[in-house]
Amino acid sequence: MLVIKDLHKSYDTGKSKLHVLKGINLEINEGEFVSIMGSSGSGKSTLLNIIGILDEKDSGTYELDGIPIEHLSEVKAAEYRSKFLGFIFQSFNLIGYKTALENVALPLYYQNVSRKVRNEKAMDYLDKVGLKDWAHHLPNELSGGQKQRVAIARALITDPKVILADEPTGALDSKTTYDIMKLLQEINREGKTIIVVTHEPDVAAETKRNVILKDGIIESDELITQRVLV
């Protein structure tokens, strides 16, 4: 599903180059539920951005579903993101003047799906995350947990190969974190590949594999006994 070999990434700080990723080797198979952890500056966000085709590597190889990801135009990068990836963000990234239904349906608008079909699918996915009754509410009328459920439904609606979640519980209280991770576990059990970047050990414990970055390299990569939420 996802194969990364000898991945390097540096940023020019003006006076020098900051070498952020220093030879990452990582394979993630279809259906895995992986957490990526590391302290600030470890490279986890940079790695997620490269996996999400939001940033480019300097060297090494990255293949997504057998397709080499390199030298992409902005149009082709957007096409691959739309086809392969679903994104969940800490800050939800919902459009404030659009209803929950409209936010979830938006990715299908960019795929030129008719309004009738995309709204039907959006309602189905809102039902899946338990928010069908809130379909016509604006984001400011929703709790943090409800906003994240809308974001999860939006990430799922295009049936992506991989869900990328960047600190998805960072803005949530412990009870809501539990509910969101339970939902992600359920989605994973249905076969969806999920990669979560988190700094929270409790969140990582609810995945099946934990990759720890330190100073731009993988310090450990272990299968873990998942704490299944019921």
Image: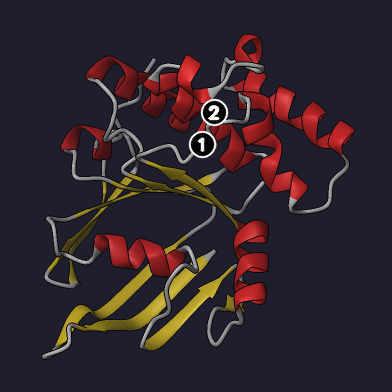
Quadrant placement of the N terminus = bottom right
Q: Residue at x 17, y 83 (%)?
A: 13
Which tag, 2 or 1, sits closer to the chain's start? 1
Label 2: element kind: helix
In the image, taking residue 157 as reference, residue 211 lies left or right, namely: left
Q: Is residue 225 above or below residue 177?
A: below
Quadrant placement of the C terminus = top left
Q: Is residue 74 above or below residue 200?
A: below
121 or 109: which is nearer to us? 109
Residue density around tag 2, few if under 14, some if 14–19, many if 20 or more, within 10 Å: many
Please give the residue where the numbered disc 1 appears in the rendered image: 94
In the figure, residue 116 lies in which quadrant? Answer: top right
Which numbered marker is on residue 22?
Answer: none
Q: Are marks 2 and 1 in contact (CB under 8 Å)?
A: yes
Q: Residue at x 73, y 24 (%)?
A: 124
151 or 156: which is nearer to us? 151
198 or 95: which is nearer to us? 95
- Residue 131 at what x, y percent from top left? 59, 15
Disc 2 or disc 1, which is closer to the eye? 1
* Distance in Å between CA atoms under marks 2 and 1: 8 Å
Q: Is residue 65 above or below residue 103?
A: below
The answer, for residue 15, to whether it is visible in the render is: yes
In the image, taking residue 133 as reference, residue 145 lies left or right, namely: left
- Residue 158 at what x, y percent from top left? 69, 46
Q: Is residue 205 above or below residue 20?
A: above
Please give the residue where the numbered disc 2 appears in the rendered image: 150
Q: Amino acid at mark 1?
A: Leu
Q: What is the tally of numbered marks visible in this picture?
A: 2
Q: Amino acid at mark 2?
A: Val
- Residue 37 at what x, y percent from top left? 21, 52
32 or 60: which is nearer to us? 60
